[in-house]
Image (spheres, rainbow, N blue to C red):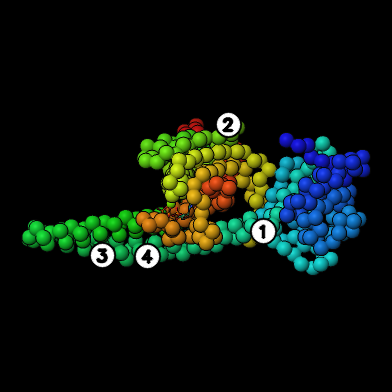
Amino acid sequence: MMSPPSLADDRDSASLPSEAAILDALPDAVLVVDADDRIRFVNSGAEDFFQASSTTLVRYRLTDLVHSSSPLREAVTQVRAAGGVVTKYAVNVGTPRTGGERPVDLQATSVSDNPSFVVVMLLARSMAHKIDRQLTHRGAARSVSGMASMLAHEIKNPLAGIRGAAQLLEPALGSDDRALTRLICSETDRIRDLVDQMEVFSDERPPERKPVNIHVVLAHVKSLVEAGLSHPVTIREEYDPSLPPLLGNRDQLIQIFVNLVKNAVEAIEATGQAGEITLSTAFRPGMKLSVSSSSDRISLPLEVCVHDTGSGIPEDVRPHIFDPFVTTKSGGRGLGLALVAKIVQDHGGVVESFPRDRGTTFRILLPVLRNPIEIPETEAVS
Ligand SMILES: Nc1ncnc2c1ncn2[C@@H]1O[C@H](COP(=O)(O)OP(=O)(O)OP(=O)(O)O)[C@@H](O)[C@H]1O
Ligand SMILES: [Mg+2]
């Protein structure tokens, strides 16, 4: 791995052009700030973003460029105080010079061989969009939740009545007509199953939570899915053994990953070729999330990814995949990812999807158990 270039150091001027050219090739804005808040380097993405040339920008201090409560200044201060990486999603950054603020995802980190330098990257708003969409999914999940309770009350009871009446009729009928009563029974069962699935959304009670080792959950999901495989799919595991436990509901976490891995298998099947699913975990202690709707910054250091080499998500459905009833499959209900979004949200986490060269990655970020010492013995890691 390349060591971070000392971009603002005159002594390195001989090697600077190629490093600068590399950074200029990035579409996103990169700037380097020194211990006195002076801007020491900007790439061309940052020139575009702040609408000023690099010769102008390197004469500024951060305090001249952005206002005092800007998330950019906040992130730089936080990195200086605590180190690591500070990530802020969907925050507005702009300069009073041009007036316009733009929603971006922001990442700030210190340079390893000179921690007084902070590198800031402002990423285009794709992630910002995703987080906004997540908040919309929550709205969608809530509206489904209202509908689900209504369905449960208004449909299930009469349905049981219809089914019971068909069964009562059956003995008095000839064999041709019995086929019809059986049809009534099987179709009412199908509606009942659908309503049962929907009822999960109406359950607003917080799930019972215990410390959970996510690797145990993933191993269980792997064996469950492997047992039902009819297509050549290899499931690989790349786990970070230092991962701390999380406080969660084991059954619901299993539901999340069964849905994601099933979708991954179906996406591979759609290619008609053999494929691979990778389950990976990582501990990212610097991962902080701040969303525009709240001033709180939440720490979501536990990362679980499900990557597949499948067909990829069709571009037109990509923005809607977490909404209920969105499906591209003939027998699909479009409830899998809506359920994933609800459970992840109930666990205080975030789920997002990324297209890959080949296939798709779903990434879930979750909070960890704050103080594992407080775990009662009866709730030992399962
Ligand atoms: N790993 C993936 N690769 C490609 N497309 C995917 C993937 N995961 C989800 N999708 C797309 O998102 C849609 C919604 O997924 P979701 O799991 O919510 O519903 P579904 O799989 O169609 O039906 P079900 O209710 O049976 O899960 C899918 O129909 C598919 O188009
Ligand atoms: Mg599904």
Q: Amino acid at mark 3?
A: Pro
Q: Are marks 2 and 3 in contact (CB under 8 Å)?
A: no
Q: Which mark is residue 158?
A: 3
Residue at 51% over, 44% down: 308
**Disc 4 packing (10 Å; few <14; some 14–19; many ≥20):** some
Q: Mark 3 to mark 1: distance in Å? A: 49 Å
Q: Mark 1 to mark 4: distance in Å? A: 38 Å
First of labels 2, 3 by sequence position = 3
Q: Mark 4 to mark 2: distance in Å? A: 45 Å
Q: Amino acid at mark 4?
A: Met
Query: Would you say 371 lies left or right of 91 here?
Result: left
Residue at 86% over, 44% down: 16
Residue 179 drawn above or below residue 364? below
Q: Nearer the viewer, mark 4 or mark 2?
A: 2
Residue 166 drawn above or below residue 243? below
- Identify the residue position indicated by label 1 in the image: 125
**Disc 3 packing (10 Å; few <14; some 14–19; many ≥20):** few
Residue at 58% over, 42% down: 303
Q: Amino acid at mark 2?
A: Pro
Q: Does residue 76 appear anywhere in the picture?
A: no
- Identify the residue position indicated by label 2 in the image: 241
Q: Position of residue 343 (x, y in %)?
A: 48, 51
- Identify the residue position indicated by label 4 in the image: 150
**Circle 1 sits in a helix, a strand or a loop, which is it?**
loop
First of labels 1, 2 by sequence position = 1
Which residue ends up furthest to the bottom in the rendered image?
A: 99
**Circle 4 sits in a helix, a strand or a loop, which is it?**
helix
Q: Is the N terminus in the top left, top right, bottom left or bottom right quadrant?
A: top right
Say which of 111 and 348 sits in front.
Answer: 111
